Amino acid sequence: MMINHACRKCGFLVLFFLMLLAANGLAQPKQPLKLWYKQPSGRVWENALPIGNGRMGAMIYGNVEKELIQLNEHTVWSGGPNRNDNPLALDSLALVRQLIFDGKQKEAERLANRVIITKKSHGQKFEPIGSLQLAFEGHENFSDYRRELDIERAVATTTYTANGVTYTRQAIASFPDRVVVMRLSANKAGSLSFGATFATPQKRATIATTPAKELTISGITSDHESVKGMVQYKGIVRMKLEGGTLTANDTALMVRGANAVTIYISAATNFINYSDLGGDADKRAADFLNKAYAKSFAAMLPTHVAGYQKYFNRVKLDLGTTEAASLPTDERLKGFNKVADPNFVTLYYQFGRYLLISSSQPGGQPANLQGIWNDKINPPWDSKYTININAQMNYWPAEKTALPELHEPFLRMTRELAQTGQQTARDMYGARGWAAHHNTDIWRATGAIDGATWGVWSAAGGWMSQHLWEHYLYSGDKAFLADIYPVIKGAATFYVDFLVEHPKHKWLVINPDSSPENAPAAHQGSSLDAGTTMTNQIIFELFSTAIRAAKILNKDAAFSDTLEQLRKRLPPMQIGQHGQLQEWLDDIDDPKDEHRHISHLYGLFPANQISAYRTPELHSAAKTTLTHRGDVSTGWSMGWKVNWWARMLDGNHAYKLIQNQLSPVTPGSRGGGTYNNLFDAHPPFQIDGNFGCTSGITEMLMQSAGGEVHLLPALPDVWQAGSVRGIKAIGGFELVQMEWKAGKLVKAVVRSKLGGNLRLRVPNAVKLVGGTGLRPATGNNANIYYQVDATPTPIISEKAKVQPIALQETVVYDLPTVGGKTYTFVAQ
């Protein structure tokens, strides 16, 4: 019996050891980063695989009998240049303010709907061009099917066997050639026969063929909300056959008996910028096509991959691999919350970077609510730019995951809004500077739309300006700072003029204001109020940024002094009766409120006004608020929560949100999660959750917004061992390499681009390899990029019980660095 017990015990130990190896990713070889499936997409758009080059986006369905290549071009939008300011706002501003100060928020809301919300366009729509359809007769019965998206190479591939012939389709959205290309081949000569035509939801489209046997689609985009459609678009399909014949009728091309076919797809519009539609769509589309058509697919593929990988290969993440990594992507998604699959987090993380590379390229339009992929003529929320969170979230990964060039379209949009928003500030509010409300589009509209519940919020200029500042903090580019300083100053100037004194508290507040898109019962179910916490945080941050920028540039001393004096009069954050961070000036938060927006935690992330080490009481209050609001929500909200829990230094809770995010959702279902193609479900599809989660995973591994570089700040128990390369920190620091085991830092290699003090917080003691100067940190960080403005002391309710937060022990070092040098740290 003793022997049996001993053997049984040994068996349990062996099983436990094997499970531990699997959990730590030591049992399986590294898997390629591919989304792959055993079945076609069918008619489900959220099953199709996205490719894009910033200009053009395509969804590849991988259907056997009727392949669909759904096409978008980044400037195909409804309407044309327009403004949507409400001129009644200025004369009614005093009355709206008084109603809010009198506690009559609902009455103020009804008035605002008449005098602040636009009477014109509520924003234009991002529209699809249509779909290229390829019909293959006789392919009804097939086997050995597989479709995949290789996100290490940005190549979509479909393979199957029909009638004894193996067919292969490869699709790319070429980065250097700016076209979509698909190569079709078969392993038996003369086996490729199909027909090609366009289908489109566009109402004013013409589909035709040319004498040169090209298939074309052309037209003008939709009229929408009294704005005439003015964007002229042109799409051209041209084929290059290897063997076989190509014929055409009025609206289709037919291929018969080819060995292989390469399909080149070009698209362009007459759009030059938000106020100029003087381009030649036909010529542009033809020029792109002619340049690409001169090259074979074999010649285009390596330059495309190189153009993509120059961005993608900058960051590597390894969280381990288990048997689950060998399963199809939809099966991994379905089982993620049941089995250990750390590599799936790596895939999802890198898929977020893939989507940003594919949908946001320098010189193009920013990624909108759906990136660059949309199949509907009337997409959800018009697929615009919601700038009270969603558009900003799209760009949270840009700097920290080493994609700063891809930030450019969003930064340029901010500059353009700073131009169009000057008239909004002047005409609607009698203010200098520039203003933007919660939403915009390709025409850079800055008026208030959608109703007062959403549209009265006017803090977009402050928030978007922080992206300009963030780009400077990461790059140290002083010339860039000088160039964008007028935008930051203009946003701050608007608030200088728009702030008013609160009659009760005597603080300076924005009125009318709102805390996006929450409408508490205490305000009669209205979202309107004065001096909401989020807006106060944004203005505090913006004023601090403008002051620092002016000092760096040695200018505007008098303006900076004005900002310093006004900043002192902003409301401090408050901790309410439930121990929560108050969302409004009054202590009215409901612990049962699970609203998707938790906007007043802006100060925790993306800002740095709430910190476990600098503001422990506010940090505790933020945790209470997060706990009250719950975990499960819409997709983008859960993405934001990953970042918040990372800033709470709670890796296990952050991971729980990743699990919630990676819960399978089918089209038409309710609740946030992830579709089979790993698109984020708001629902329906919004791309911001993908980007938000990628940012949050980075924040779990490294943070640099709090005055220091913090390594492994929120490592969950399930990631006991791993490595990451290439992520970036403020001040020009690059984490060239980081390895950890058993939750402890083993090695970190940091490259300093700009020099200056490196303040390093780590979970265990380390030593500097082959150098001197590493010492315990003391005082404030002397590095100019790591200056943190002191958060005003919060007001705490007498009823509040602020719970202390237990923090893991860490070690903090200072090391003077030299620009261009690399420093290696290893565990002691």
Image (tube, rainbow, N blue to C red):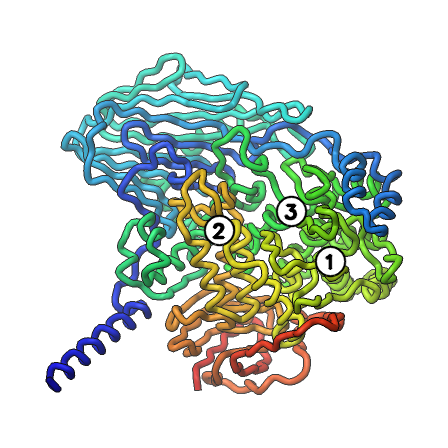
Viewer can see residue 786? yes
Q: Percent from the top left, x then y, of residue 362?
A: 56, 46
**Mark 1 touching mark 3, by CB under 8 A?**
no
380 or 344, which is in the foreground? Answer: 380
690 or 799, which is in the foreground? Answer: 799
Does 212 appear above or below 662? above
Q: Which residue is mark 1?
A: 584
**Mark 1 touching mark 2, by CB under 8 A?**
no
In which quadrant is the N terminus drawn?
bottom left
In which quadrant is the C terminus drawn?
bottom left
**Mark 3 touching mark 2, by CB under 8 A?**
no
> Is 93 left, or right, of 740 in this rendering?
right
Q: Residues within 10 Å of mark 1 (few under 14, many from 20)?
A: many
Q: Percent from the top left, x then y, of residue 488?
A: 74, 54
Residue 387's mark? 3
Q: Residue at x 58, y 37 (%)?
A: 381
Viewer can see residue 433? no
Q: CA distance from mark 3 to mark 2?
A: 17 Å
Does 163 appear above or below 574? above
Q: CA distance from mark 1 to mark 3?
A: 21 Å
Q: Residue at x 55, y 30 (%)?
A: 378
Of callouts 3 and 2, which one flags the residue occurring earlier in the amino acid sequence?
Answer: 3
The amino acid on which the numbered mark 2 sits, given as a three-letter code, is Asn
Q: Residue at x 36, y 62 (%)?
A: 342
Secondary structure category for the residue under label 1: loop
91 or 553, which is in the foreground? Answer: 91
> Is 303 left, or right, of 465 in this rendering?
left
141 or 550, which is in the foreground? Answer: 141
Q: Nearer the viewer, mark 1 or mark 3?
A: 1
Secondary structure category for the residue under label 2: helix
The amino acid on which the numbered mark 1 sits, given as a three-letter code, is Trp
The amino acid on which the numbered mark 3 sits, given as a three-letter code, is Ile
